[in-house]
Image (tube, helix red, strand yellow):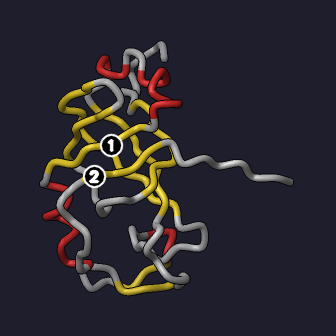
Amino acid sequence: MDLNIRIIGYIRNDWDHARPDQADSIMRSVSTIEVKEEYADGLYKIEKYRELNILWYFNRSDGYELQTTTRSGDYRGVFACCSPRRPSAIGLTRVTLLERNGNILTVTGLDALNGTPVLDIKPSLDLNQTSV
């Protein structure tokens, strides 16, 4: 089986490095998602959505742990927490869309570092919403 995943863009913010305890600060800051021009048409009508799910690649994470201590001090399995040290190194964050300017999305709530590759963007749908 082939797995074809493309990098569709990159995260831009002031966070080149961060400690695990700074994740909340990163999420409170403003980030931009620069979608590659070749995928920009895929953003058509994205501003209809206030919240988006951003899938990204933990490109600076080294290896994985199946159990780890969380930021709160709890000990859990990796699939029961938000550790960057994951077997597939895929991050998922729900963000608030502030603005779209061409191929640039301005968001808050993103907990990824500057230069992080973006794999996909999907609208975050309300459970009562009937059409996509």
Q: Nearer the viewer, residue 9 or 81?
A: 9
Residue 44, how many percent across, how many down?
A: 42, 17
Q: Residue at x 31, y 24 (%)?
A: 102
Kind of residue at badge 1: Ile
On the image, numbered disc 2 is attached to which residue? 12
Name the quadrant of the N terminus.
bottom right
Residue 76, relative to residue 102: is it above or below? below
Distance CA(mark 1)–CA(mark 2) = 6 Å
| Residue sitting at the far right | 1
Residue 34, how many percent across, how many down?
A: 35, 41
Residue 75, label in figure: none
- Quarter of image, res 68: bottom left
Which label's residue is closer to the chain start, 1 or 2? Answer: 2
Q: Residue at x 45, y 55 (%)?
A: 117
| Residue sitting at the far front | 37
Q: Is residue 73 left or right of residue 126?
A: left
Residue 96, relative to residue 125: is it above or below? below
Q: Nearer the viewer, residue 6 or 96?
A: 6
- Quarter of image, res 27: bottom left
Q: Is residue 115 left or right of residue 90?
A: left
Kind of residue at badge 2: Arg
Q: Residues within 10 Å of mark 1 (few under 14, many from 20)?
A: many
Q: Residues within 10 Å of mark 2 (few under 14, many from 20)?
A: many
Q: Is residue 88 left or right of residue 111?
A: right
Q: Nearer the viewer, residue 38 or 11?
A: 38
Label 1: element kind: strand
Q: How many marks?
A: 2
Q: Residue at x 75, y 52 (%)?
A: 3
Residue 36, how many percent across, how many down?
A: 45, 37
On the image, numbered disc 1 is attached to which residue? 33
Label 2: element kind: strand
